[in-house]
Image: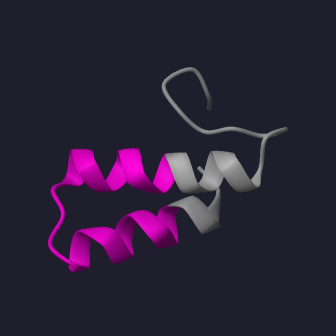
Amino acid sequence: MPRQYEAMRDAFIKQGLSTKAAKKKAARIYNSQNPGNPVGRNSD
């Protein structure tokens, strides 16, 4: 996974979000900023 996504995910978890919610929020933000290289269920 991209480092930017992982950093956002970890920051959201530290703020108190559940792991599932943090992953979802980080993926939405990352994908909006990087439409050519999205993260999600079907990515590596």
Pick the front one: 1 or 28: 28
Q: Is residue 35 above or below residue 26?
A: above
Horizontal side of residue 33 vs 44, given as left or right: right
Quadrant of residue 10 within the rendered picture:
bottom left
The kind of secondary structure the magenta stretch mainly shows is helix
Residue 4, position in %: x, y? 62, 67
Q: Quadrant of the C terminus?
A: top right
When asked about the image quadrant of residue 42, the answer is top right
Magenta span includes 16: yes
The magenta-colored residue range is 6-27
Q: Is residue 15 above or below residue 9?
A: below
Q: Is residue 7 left or right of residue 31?
A: left
Give coordinates of residue 21: x percent, y percent: 25, 49
14 vs 33, nearest the viewer: 33
The image quadrant that residue 36 belongs to is top right
Left-right relation of 38 to 12: right
